Amino acid sequence: MFEYEKLTREEQEDYLELAILKYLQIVQNPVERVQVLEYLSKHDIFIPHAEFETDSTGTESQIKPRFRFALTALEHAGLVYHPQKGMTALTDLGNKIQTSDTSTIKRLVINGQRKYNNKD
């Protein structure tokens, strides 16, 4: 049986990246970060509820930093963008990529991180 808690940090981020992409491909519109989190907390049976917590203001569900890392990785990979603060949307590539093609997604994420880290 799949156990999210037993995954390494990197594997958890990989899992979240796919979950985020799948949701964005379903909705096909820019969404607020909180909408993604609410969807994952209600529909993804593998992510433990303990991963979702309330921020200091009590206004937004927030997954521990792995969620932010996953979003950033998807952005660096060219799969999502942020049309405005707190919003996330798919790029054309993000819309076209098959979420079952995990090796291509992983390659895009790794290449995106390398490019970002090598910026002047």
Image: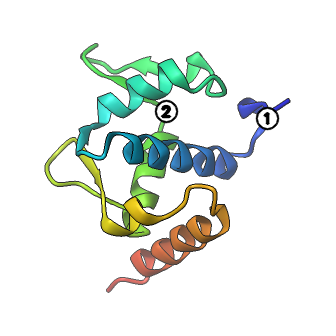
Specify the quadrant of the image occupied by residue 5: top right
**x%, y% of residue 104?**
60, 71
> In this picture, is 52 found above or below 103?
above
Nearest the eye: 78 or 97: 97
As helix, strand or loop, the secondary structure at mark 2 comes to loop
* Residue that mark 1 sits on: 6
User: Considering only order in the chain, which callout, 2 or 1, is on the residue closer to the N terminus?
Assistant: 1
- Residue at the image point whose x is 52% and y is 72% from the top: 108
Q: CA distance from mark 1 to mark 2?
A: 16 Å
Residue farthest to the right, as pictured = 1
Label 2 packing within 10 angstroms: few (<14), some (14-19), many (20+): few
* Residue that mark 2 sits on: 64
Nearest the eye: 39 or 70: 39
- Residue at the image point whose x is 46% and y is 49% from the top: 21
**x%, y% of residue 61?**
36, 22
Mark 1: which amino acid? Answer: Lys
